[in-house]
Amino acid sequence: MELLDAFKWRYATKKFDPTKKVDQALVDKIVEAAWIAPTSSGLQPFEVLVISNQELKNKIVPIAYDQQIVADCSHLLVFAAWDNYTAERIDNIYAHTTTEREQPSDRYRAYTDRLKEMYLNQSAEANLAHTARQAYIAFGFAIAEAASLQVDSTPMEGFIGEELDQLLKLNEKGLKSVTILPIGYRDEVNDWLVNLKKVRHPKTEFLTIID
Amino acid sequence: MELLDAFKWRYATKKFDPTKKVDQALVDKIVEAAWIAPTSSGLQPFEVLVISNQELKNKIVPIAYDQQIVADCSHLLVFAAWDNYTAERIDNIYAHTTTEREQPSDRYRAYTDRLKEMYLNQSAEANLAHTARQAYIAFGFAIAEAASLQVDSTPMEGFIGEELDQLLKLNEKGLKSVTILPIGYRDEVNDWLVNLKKVRHPKTEFLTIID
């Protein structure tokens, strides 16, 4: 299947079949897609949590405005962005890069100095707006990968971030949950959305071509 | 090629071959991927501009800190997010949805009332943070689609937003450029990044599994 056909096949699943679990090999691929996604300056300013523990998923249901898909899904991916940039975080990323590339440890010093100059002079709020955007590229990659594997997923922002952060102890790690992605297999009979036409804004309004 | 292999093949191209143009059919598919991407409440709060006009690309080079890839790429995609949510924009989207689905025009009234209640009581800045995130999902989809077609692309935030908005008259349309994506074909001989190892943060630090 061409990727575009997978994109047309996918939809925001509203009812998962709780008896169907996604194979670990496929979960690994979806996580790998999020991991390999590009980010600004390669900083990868977010982490991913993969939750299949039923008790924990059940606890997240009320935090997600009682949406049952959080309990019924096979695995719940939580995208948690860095709550801020710090010198240590930036140095840590580039220390790893130079090690992996067998480069001198100061190879990117001038570059990381510029990054610090920029980010450490911005508010935590402005930096979170930026780290969250990077997480959303990876979120897109994970949704794309799931679709390509014919695994259903539901992009979801409908949850109380502060409560989820507290439950998952994300604050202690300097993270904030920004979006979540239940994955699993659709319950075709009971999903009200599955047979509704996928609608997008007309291309005439969406797209401007300048040749 | 599996999608994950395409993700490993792709990299942020630093030098395009200016003589190689991307076929229109492939450009259309990349745009289609951005268009079909999921967004919060289906609002699609962004537009895409596709620029192949050489004169205009040249004008954008200084706005993009003199990065020559903007001139050398085949097509430049600009992702421009809504600068704010408005009742009119929300109604416009759902009017189209009900028409396409042949539903009563007030089918989603209660839902759109809740959306307005939420977004119209937030600052334009908070709403832009949200519309930009949606644009980044589509940005991810476009990068993924390009990779699947073996078209090179460079996710780029390095440009002066206000100047690009002015040049492209985005303000008049209530839009703000949030990220850009040059696409084309790599100049393998002259690209300093093409042969460097792709490095990501160790999975032990990136990933938390809760079984």
Image (cartoon, coloured by chain):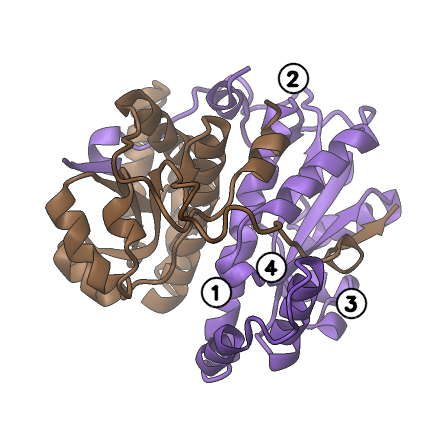
Chain colours: A purple, B brown
Tag of residue A130? 1
Residue for badge 3: A169
Q: Amino acid at mark 4?
A: Gln
- Give the Cα separation between the discs numbered 3 and 2: 35 Å
Residue for badge 4: A44
Mark 1 or mark 2: name the one nearer the start of the chain: 1
Front label number (3 vs 4):
4
Number of other residues with Cα within 10 Å of mark 3, as a class: few under 14, some 14 to 19, many 20 or more? few
Q: Which secondary structure lies at badge 4?
A: loop
Front label number (3 vs 2):
3
Q: Amino acid at mark 2?
A: Glu
Q: Amino acid at mark 1?
A: His
Q: Is residue B8 left or right of residue B206?
A: left
Residue for badge 2: A188
Q: Position of residue B199 (x, y in %)?
A: 64, 54
Give A5 or A197, whichever is nearer the viewer: A5
- Give the Cα separation between the discs numbered 1 and 2: 37 Å
Mark 2, chain letter? A
Q: Is residue A89 left or right of residue A54?
A: left
Mark 3 or mark 2: name the one nearer the start of the chain: 3
- Residue at image coords 59%, 22%: B1
Mark 1, chain letter? A
Q: Position of residue A201 (x, y in %)?
A: 30, 33
- Quadrant in which residue A12 is drawn: top right
Front label number (1 vs 3):
1
Give B60 or A172, whichever is nearer the viewer: B60
Give B109 or A9, whichever is nearer the viewer: A9
